[in-house]
Amino acid sequence: MAQRTWTRKKRDKRQREDIERHEERRERRRASLMEQSVSQLGLEEAEEFSDTAIARSRKVKDGQRSQSEDLVPGRVIHFRRSLFEVQLEDGSLIQARSRSTTRSPHPDSTLVAVGDRVLVDPAQALIAEVQPRENRISRASKIHDEIEQVIVSNVDQLLVVASVCDPYLKPGVLDRYLLAAEAYHISSIIVLNKVDLDPAGEWQEIAKIYRAAGYPVLECSAESRAGLELLRDTLTNRVSVLSGQSGVGKSSLLNALDPELELPVGEIMQGARKGRHTTTHSRLIAFRFGGWVADTPGIKEFRLWGMDEAEVAALYPEFRVHAGECHFHNCSHTHEPDCAVKQAVEDGIVSMLRYRNYLQVLEQLRGN
Ligand code: GDP
Ligand code: ZN
C-alpha cells in the first residue's frame, strides 16, 4: 500500500511537471508571437501591449540565442555503442554523445532517448540540449527506480494491429494496447489486418464498436494489399509505434508498404524479437515515403498499476463522455448509484463488450 502511495505521488509529480512544461512552452510560443506582432505593428501600436509581455519575450529570445549559437536541431533516431544517431533537418545523419553537461528539461528520466528532438554541437559531436518531450513511452519503472526509462519519445500515433483471423481478434488484448496509448497521451488507430482471410467480413461488428468508442479503424491486408494506401497515408511524415500480438502481420504490413525495409516475417522473427525486447532501446526506421516507425520493445505491460478505478475508467474515451453526469465525481462505474456510464451501457450507447472488458481490467488490477 505504501509503495502504491509512493508511486502515485511520483506519478502525480510527473504529471504536474508535464503540465508546467506545457505551460512554459505555450508561454514561449505566446511570447514569440507577441514579439512578431510587435515588429509587424510598429512602435506606436506596440504600446498597446503590456511592457512585461514584451520584456519577457525579449528575455526568452536572448536566452535562446545565447544557448543555441552554433547548435543544430535534429532528432535522435538510434542509439548504439554509446553513440546517438541524430538526423538533422536536411536529412543528414550525425553521431553524437551525451555528457553530464547535456541540458534537459526532464531531470528524472533518461537523459537522451530515441525520438528526442535535440540541439547538437557538431564541432564536438555532442548533444548539447534535449527539447521538451511532447509525450513518451516509458518502461513500467520498477518500484524505487528513481529514473524513468524512456523507450521512445515524441510519438505521433500508436497503431494497434490485430488480425481478423489467425490469430483471431481478441478485444481484451486490443483494449490493453489502447489503454496504454491513452495513459501515454498518444492517439491510437486500430489496424485490422488479414481481411483476405474472412471474406464474410465478420470483423465489421467489432470495427463498428471501436469506431463508436472514438477510434479510427483501418481494414487491410498485407496479402491482398487491400487498404494499404490509406495505411501509407496514415504513416506518412509521422512517427508511429506499431503494437499488437506477434503474428498479426506488423512486419508484413510494413514490408508491403516499403519493401526496402526487408523486415523478417513469421516464426523466426518472433524468436529474434523476444531477445531484443529485453533491452529498452528502440530505433526509428525511416520509410522511403516519409515518416518513421519506431521499432520498440513491447509496450503492453505498462503503468496501469498504481491507478485507482476512476483513473482507469478515464482511459476509455466513450466513458469520459458520460462520466461527468455520474453522481460521484470519482465514480468507478461499477457499484455506484446514478451512474451515467452504466446507464449508457444499458441504453446501448456504450458497448457492453468494452464495459465488460473494463470490469475485467479492474479485476486484474485488484488481483495485483
Ligand atoms: P508480426 O509478428 O505481427 O510482425 O507478423 P508477421 O508479419 O511476421 O506475419 C505473421 C504471419 O502472418 C506470416 O506468416 C505472414 O505471412 C502472415 N500474414 C501477414 N499479413 C497477412 C495478411 O494480410 N493476410 C494473410 N493471409 N496472411 C498474412
Ligand atoms: Zn459512473
Image: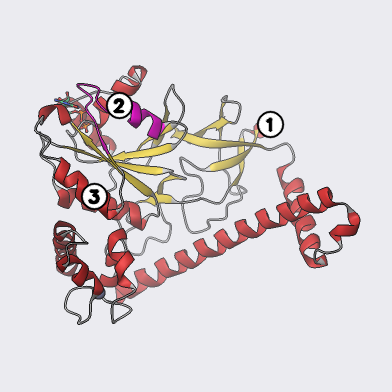
The residue that mark 1 highlights is 123
Left or right: 355 in relation to 155: left
Residue located at (30% from left, 49% from top): 215
**The C terminus is located in which quarter?**
bottom left
Mark 3 highlights which residue?
210
Secondary structure of the residue carrying tag 1 is helix
Label 2 sits on a secondary structure element that is helix
Compared to residue 341, the image places residue 270 above or below, namely above
Residue marked by disc 2: 228
Q: Nearer the viewer, residue 300 or 235?
A: 235
266 is higher (above) or lower (below) than 212: above
Residues in magenta, as a range: 218-235
Q: Cβ of disc 1 within 8 Å of ligand 1?
A: no
From the viewer's perspective, tell me whether residue 122 is left or right of residue 169.
right
The residue carrying pointer 3 sits among few (fewer than 14), some (14 to 19) or many (20 or more) residues within 10 Å by Cα, namely many
Q: Residue at x 40, y 66 (%)?
A: 11
Q: Amino acid at mark 2?
A: Leu
User: Tag 1 or tag 2, which sits nearer the N-term?
Assistant: 1
